[in-house]
Amino acid sequence: MIIKPVLIAALFSALALPVAAQDLSRGKWIDLTHPFNAGSIYWPTAKMFKKETVFEGQTEGGFYYSAYNYSAAEHGGTHLDAPIHFAKGALTADALPVAQLIGPGVVIDVTRQSAKDVDYLVSVQDIEAHERKHGRIPKGAIVLINTGRAALYPDREKYMGTAERGAEAVPKLRFPGLSKQGAELLVKRGIGAIGIDTPSIDFGQSKSFDAHVALMTNNIPAFENVADMSGLSPTGATIIALPMKIEGGSGGPLRIIAHLPGS
């Protein structure tokens, strides 16, 4: 069989075509991350964020240079709770599949309920009411609970219920969270991850952390202290939530963003 030069040229031309990348130039990006600084919200017993200057200014070589050291607990500011945080043998921060941290966003709005009840627990009824309006929560979705409390960040007393530090401050924490039954329903839906705009996926007065346990025994991570969600629609956004890849970590700082489609 003789292959004509024209066919050979056509073959190589096809192989040389560039691979088309996903077009993300259209639409809108929303940052759902609070900046890390000395005012970042941390659990009352956790080490807070600290930034130290190594060097900042003009060098002897004539160029500008800046470098800093920072230290903090894993769990503070906008951050990840890896499943190992509340489930023995579950996935650590570095072991979470990236695909589980990127997915269709579902925003459950309980701002009205939370404004009336600082200890509000997101219920099965809240989730099912969302589904009746917007469709069943798809498998692999990243569910975000909007309580409206991101607007209070970083005022510790208003956001957490107390500005005190130490173990004695923990019983004074007051903020909404997800109920055990709500968490169990989301597990059944097969979600990839869940986020909330409070310091914990469990409400402030929780003693047993039922939502954490229900989710994380099923290797579902949580994102806490998520920033303002008011720019998101109930469905339609793509959520990308990439934490620091701490080997063996129970969590870590998180950069979470949303992409809204548009022309």
Image (tube, grey):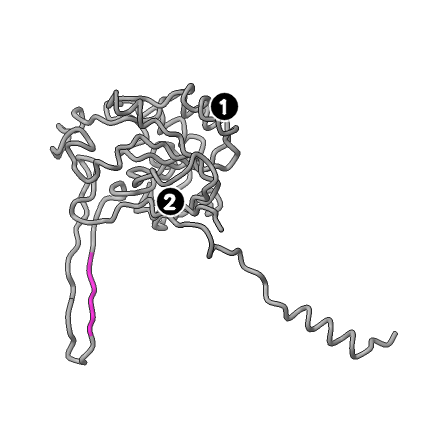
Q: Give the range drawn in magenta.
A: 64-69
Which residue shows up at 79% across the image and 79% down it? 5
Q: Point out residue 71 in the picture as x, y percentages from the top left corner.
A: 20, 51
Q: Which mark is residue 132?
A: 1
Location of residue 181 by image quarter: top left
Q: How crowded is mark 2: few (under 14 residues within 10 Å), some or many (20 or more)?
A: many
Horizontally, residue 127 falls left or right of residue 169, namely right
Residue 56 sits above or below residue 125 on the image: below
Q: Mark 2 points at which residue?
A: 93
Main SS of the magenta part reads: strand
Location of residue 146 by image quarter: top left
Residue 252 sits above or below residue 170 on the image: below
Q: Residue 45 carries which label?
A: none
Which residue shows up at 20% across the image and 33% down it? 159
Secondary structure at numbered mark 1:
helix
- Between label 1 and label 2, give the one nearer the viewer: 1
- Is residue 176 inside the magenta stretch? no
Residue 57 or residue 52, whichever sits in front: 57
Q: What residue type is labelled 2?
A: Ala
Q: What residue type is labelled 1?
A: Arg
Q: Residue furthest right?
A: 1
Q: Point out residue 251 in the picture as x, y percentages from the top left corner.
A: 32, 42
Q: Point out residue 100 in the picture as x, y percentages from the top left corner.
A: 47, 42
- Is residue 67 inside the magenta stretch? yes
Residue 149 or residue 201, whichever sits in front: 149
User: Mark 1 and mark 2: span between their CA atoms?
Assistant: 34 Å
